[in-house]
């Protein structure tokens, strides 16, 4: 989490890719997090953007979700990948920023993803957990 707070490129991401970096985030979480991320390599700027999404989402699970567990999953589909971070917590999260009721952390990540051609969405019905979904091209245009 220290690397995330400082906004620096985590060593585990550089050495082992997104799978290793997400596994490190899961190991340091006070909420159990299962990780299903294949050991593929993506464009460095895509990996870094997805890492920050994962770090922010896992941090939010710990701080706000009142969750007993979370899951990080990456799925490949053609030239795009989808990273989903879900929990079984209280739900009710929203994408922050202008017009949104949530914080600014996820709104900033949506902006970061847009730079690499990606999108961020949130599914968070009250009382039914939250899923943060980042979809990006394998290689930015």
Image: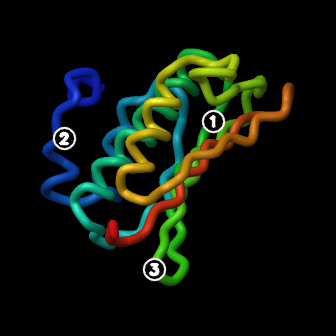
Disc nearer the start of the sequence (2/3): 2
Q: Which residue is mark 1?
A: 69
Which mark's residue is nearer the viewer, 1 or 3?
3
Tags 2 and 1 touching, CB below 8 Å: no
- Is 99 on the left-hand or right-hand side of 81? right
Which mark's residue is nearer the viewer, 2 or 1?
2
Please tell me which residue lies in front, 141 or 122: 141
Q: Position of residue 104 (x, y in %)?
A: 51, 20
Disc nearer the start of the sequence (2/1): 2
Q: Residue at x 53, y 59 (%)?
A: 135
Please tell me which residue lies in front, 30 or 132: 132
Q: Is residue 58 above or below residue 123?
A: above
Label 1, label 3: how far apart the Cα atoms are? 30 Å
Helix, strand or loop status at disc 2 = loop
Q: Which residue is mark 2?
A: 10
Q: Residue at x 27, y 21 (%)?
A: 5
Disc nearer the start of the sequence (1/3): 1
Q: Which disc number belongs to residue 79?
A: 3
Q: Position of residue 23 (x, y in %)?
A: 36, 48
Q: Residue at x 28, y 49 (%)?
A: 48
Helix, strand or loop status at disc 1 = loop
Q: Residue furthest bottom?
A: 78
Which class describes the residues within 10 Å of circle 3: few (<14), some (14-19), or many (20+)?
few
Q: Which disc number belongs to residue 1?
A: none
């Amino acid at each position: 989490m220290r690397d995330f707070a400082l906004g620096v490129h985590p060593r585990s991401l550089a050495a082992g890719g997104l799978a290793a970096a997400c596994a490190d985030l899961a190991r340091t979480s006070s909420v159990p997090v299962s990780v299903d991320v294949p050991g593929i390599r993506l464009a460095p700027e895509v990996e870094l953007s997805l890492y920050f999404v994962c770090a922010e989402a896992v941090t939010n699970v710990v701080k706000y979700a009142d969750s007993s567990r979370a899951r990080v999953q990456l799925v490949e589909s053609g030239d795009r990948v989808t990273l989903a971070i879900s929990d079984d917590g209280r739900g009710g999260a929203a994408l922050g920023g202008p017009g949104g009721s949530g914080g600014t952390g996820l709104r900033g990540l949506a902006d970061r993803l847009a730079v690499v051609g990606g999108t961020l969405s949130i599914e968070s019905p009250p009382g039914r957990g939250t899923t943060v979904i980042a979809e990006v091209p394998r290689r930015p245009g």
